[in-house]
Image (cartoon, rainbow, N blue to C red):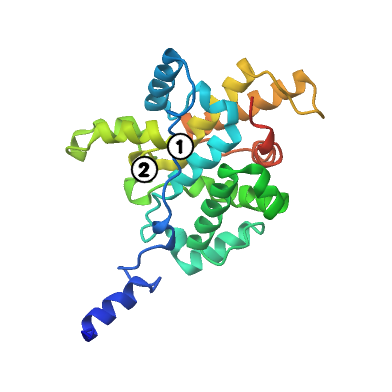
Amino acid sequence: MTEISPAMTAYRNSLADPTSDSYIPKFSMMPPLSLDYTTWELEEDVAAEMKQSREDAGISRVDTWSFDQFISAVIVNGLLHTELHTHPLHDEKAWAYFKASNPKVLDSSFEESIIFITTALGEYRHDPDAFFVHRGKEVLTRVLETFVALFPHLKRYESYNSSGLRASRADDFLDTVENGDIPTKRHYRERQLFGVSWSDSTDLAEHLAGVFAIGFEILANNGHTHPNDLSVSEWDYTLRKLARGFKNYHLYGTPLEAWVQDKFVERFTSFWD
């Protein structure tokens, strides 16, 4: 049997040491969730419109038919692009301070919170009914509360300039000369298949806010259902206020008000048409 050299042993140990610059996050092993609807019996013009809308904004009208599951997938796919080592919350002290300000977040580290969210929402995306049987509503609530707390921090901090200005939108980011030859075809193909691309994760919160805003507006304008405990007008008001809150974040970086955060969590399972 070939003996493993001390150097190789040290290298392998570094891959499992969260404090090492060579450390590979656990969530790196998770595959993205496919949003490819080629097996659906969509009319040709509907399928073409869906693909174009995905490229333009990361979401289409078709995606709002099961918007809660689509949201789950696009959150997971976005978080899998997280650059762990460059993120401030990867630091233990920064994470401790964050948790003190966000008591609903129970995970022991930033990485563990990503693993918790992606694992649970991946399960929810696969089968919501099975999720509630085996995991329960309490887990979904905790997942969404954790995501909402992390939401404004979901960005690549190295993409900010020395003045702390927000990174440009993904499309503009791709078009800037200083970024060199970025594969735009791959960017749009990833949006088609996953609702989010690696380039979108430059400011993931901004991209997700745009996706959510469009989705809630589509539901308000074209939806055919509403929760049993709300009237049609009450549900319309809720959807439009959610859309406006996320749109303001998307366009101006306006922090999400508590009402928007709470309703996003509380009404998550009602986001479908």
Residue 48 visible in the displayed image: yes
Q: Is residue 233 left or right of residue 252?
A: right
The mark tally for this picture is 2
The residue sitting at 45% across, 29% down in the picture is: 39
Q: Secondary structure at mark 1?
A: helix
Residue 190 at x, y = what percent?
35, 36
- Between 127 and 170, which is closer to the camera in this rendering? 127
Mark 1, Cα crowd under 10 Å, few <14 / some 14-19 / many 20+, is many
The residue sitting at 42% across, 13% down in the picture is: 45
Residue 123 at x, y = what percent?
57, 49
User: Which residue position holds label 1?
Assistant: 206
Residue 136 at x, y = what percent?
71, 52
- In the rendered view, would you say 194 is above or below 273? below
Which label was assigned to residue 148? Answer: none
Mark 2, Cα crowd under 10 Å, few <14 / some 14-19 / many 20+, is many
Specify the quadrant of the image occupied by residue 101: bottom right
Specify the quadrant of the image occupied by residue 183: top left
- Between 145 and 172, which is closer to the camera in this rendering? 145
- In the rendered view, would you say 99 is above or below 11? above
Q: Which residue type carries mark 1?
A: Glu
Which label was assigned to residue 202? Answer: 2
Q: Secondary structure at mark 2?
A: helix
Specify the quadrant of the image occupied by residue 212: top right
Question: Rounded to the nearest whole Å, what is the CA distance between mark 2 and mark 1?
Answer: 9 Å
